[in-house]
Amino acid sequence: MNVLDTFKLDGKTAVVTGGGGLYGRQVVEAVAEAGAKTFAAGFTMQKEEKTAEKLRSAGWDVTAVQYDQGSEESIQALLDTVVKQAGRVDVLVNNAVVRPMKSWDSPTEDFIKSMKVNATGLYLMTRLFGNHMAERGGGSIVNIGSIHGMIAPDFTLYEGLGWGAPPDYFFHKGGMLQLTRYAASTLGPMGVRVNVISPGGFFNHQEDIFVQRYNKRTLLGRMADETDLKGAVVFLASDASSYVTGANLVVDAGYTVK
C-alpha cells in the first residue's frame, strides 16, 4: 500500500464532539476530507448544523447530531443513533469542552459543572464508544487536549487584560492525558488505539498585546490557525498511525520546549 493511502478514512465512520467549535470545525473538515462518514455532535447544534451544511455543499458526508455530554443516557443515545445510521463507529474525536470557570475564585458550582462534562463526560464517551470499538475488534479514539494539561499557566500573558487561565481547564486537560493512557492500556488488546493531541493557543482575535506576548513564547512566532490540527487528527485517526497508542502529540509551535 502506498503510504498516502494509509491516511485515508474511506469507508469509516467518525464522530467528532464539539463539532462546531474553534477546533471542532477543522477536525470535522479533516476527517470528512479524508473520506470518513462524519457526525458532528454538539449540544446546542447551531454551529454543528452550520459546519455540516457547509461541508455537505462541498461534497463531503457530514451529519450534525445533538447530544449532552453531561448525561450518560444522552451519550448512549448518540452512540445508538450513529450505529443505527452508519452501522458502526471507527473513529471518535473527543473535542467537546465547556468552560464555566473564569478564575481561581469562581464559584464551586462552576468547577462541578465543568467536571460533569469535561471529566465524567469524557470518561463516559471514551468507555462507551471504546467498548463498542473493542467489540468490533478495532478503532481509534483521539482526544483533543491542551498544552495546559502539561504545563503551569504563565499569568504574565494575561496581565492587564481582565481574563486569564481558570484552574478547571488545567485540571481536566491534565487528567485527559492519564485517561488516554489508561484507555489505551485497557482497549489496546482489543485493537483500539487511544491517543491525545495537545494543541497550543488558537488565534481567535484576542487583544494584540496578548497575541504579541504569546507569539514570542513560540518557536514559530505565531498562534495556531484554522488548519493546524487537521494533519495531526487524520494521522492519529487513520492507519498511518497503526502502531501508535497512548501517545501525546504536541502541536504547539514549540511553546512547551522553551
Image (spheres, rainbow, N blue to C red):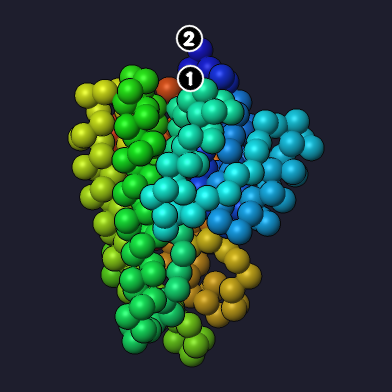
Other-residue count near label 1 (Cα within 10 Å), few / some / many at <14 / 14–19 / ≥20? some
Residue at the limit of the structure toward the top, as seen here: 1
Residue that badge 1 annotates: 6
Q: Counting other residues with Cα less than 10 Å from the Cα at mark 2, is it few (<14), some (14-19), or many (20 or more)?
A: few
**Label placed on residue 197:** none
Question: Which is nearer the N-term, disc 2 or disc 1?
Answer: 2
x 26%, y 48%: residue: 179
Q: Amino acid at mark 1?
A: Thr
For the view shown, which residue lies furthest in the front direction? 73
Disc 1 element: helix
Q: Which residue lies at the image location 57% right of the left edge and 64% below the top edge?
A: 203
Q: Where on the picture, by quarter, is residue 255?
A: bottom left
* Cβ–Cβ under 8 Å for marks 2 and 1: yes
Q: Residue at x 43, y 42 (%)?
A: 76
Q: Residue at x 26, y 57 (%)?
A: 175
Q: Please name the residue that numbered disc 2 is placed on.
A: 1
Location of the C terminus by quadrant is bottom left
184 on left or right of 23: left
Residue 222 pos. (x, y %): 53, 61
Q: Amino acid at mark 2?
A: Met
**Image quarter for residue 142?**
top left
